Image (spheres, rainbow, N blue to C red):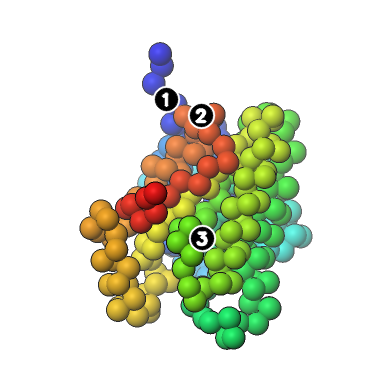
Amino acid sequence: MHAPNFRLDGKVALVTGSSRGLGRAMAFALGSAGAKVAFNYRNSQETAERTFAEYKAEGFEGGLFRASVIDEAEVNRMNAEIAAQLGPVDIVVVSATPDQPLRTIEEYDWAFYQSMLDYFVRSPYLLTRAALPHMKKQRWGRIINLTSEVFNRGVSPFSAYVAAKGAQIGWSRSMAGELAPYGITVNMLAPGWIPVERHANDPEHEKEAYRRLIPMDRWGVPGDVAGTIVYLASDASSFVTGQDIHVNGGMTVG
């Protein structure tokens, strides 16, 4: 029996929202496994360019691409630009996310609910549809959605985000069955609350309350998602699809 193949040499991986936080960590992990990584960002060009320069300094291959992942024309343009520069996309990691304030239902309006659905249903739909012709032709592909433990834990008051994440999970499970005959897997990686740059101003009492609940008795760090993302992107997971793998120190056991 041969050892599982976790290498990604010759593969092209798109990681959305990869200029910082968990997206950055996953992009670096995929690059270290041999993939050519397409870094995607929308807003901060300076941060994105600094991140990509650090990535290149490690000797990894890839490119930097600006696009809104909720805009159909921009997604299609980005997909074409990646194919021209790096090759067709083999692996899609849907990581880009907007701000996620906790609010009661009275404080939300439908526009905010729609913004959550745009990022967590429209975005994976557009990204997957753009990459599918190549994946189906070669009968190999990986779609990996970043979901969240909030759906399983029923976190409140957080209904817009929780609902959108539930929709994303349902979409992923349905797509897993649809694309399985083509050798394309659709899986999910559900991090717990892993503090990154966008959590810098979160209230300390909320952080500490969550921290006390973690069975492994430590905070998660961005590097904790690295092994899981490489596994889901590689041939080692070729018979795994439709799964939501929680990386949260045991917060959703049972």
Q: In the image, is residue 146 above or below residue 107?
A: above
CB within 8 Å, label 1 to label 3:
no
Tell me which numbered mark, 2 or 3, is placed earlier along the sequence: 3
Amino acid tagged 1? Pro
User: 58 or 191: nearer the eye?
Assistant: 191
Spatial separation of the CA atoms under disc 1 and disc 3: 31 Å
Q: In the image, is residue 184 above or below residue 52?
A: above
**Res 235 label:** 2
Q: Nearer the viewer, mark 1 or mark 3?
A: 3
- Provide the secondary structure element on which disc 2 rests: helix
Q: Which residue is mark 3?
A: 151
Q: In the image, is residue 2 above or below residue 36?
A: above
Percent x, y of residue 5: 44, 26
- Provide the secondary structure element on which disc 1 rests: loop
Query: On the picture, is 201 further left or further right than 77?
Result: left
Q: Which residue is mark 1?
A: 4
Label 2, residues with CA under 10 Å away: few <14, some 14-19, many ≥20? some
Label 3, residues with CA under 10 Å away: few <14, some 14-19, many ≥20? some
Query: On the picture, is 40 further left or further right than 76?
Result: left
Amino acid tagged 2? Asp
Query: On the picture, is 206 further left or further right than 144?
Result: left
- Provide the secondary structure element on which disc 3 rests: helix
Percent x, y of residue 66: 61, 61
Percent x, y of residue 132: 71, 41
Q: Nearer the viewer, mark 2 or mark 3?
A: 3
Amino acid tagged 3? Phe
Report whether residue 133 is seen.
yes
User: 190 or 52: nearer the eye?
Assistant: 190
Q: In the image, is residue 204 above or below residue 146?
A: below
Percent x, y of residue 19: 48, 61
Residue under the image location 29 percent in, 59 percent down: 214
As drawn, the residue found furthest toward the left would be 217
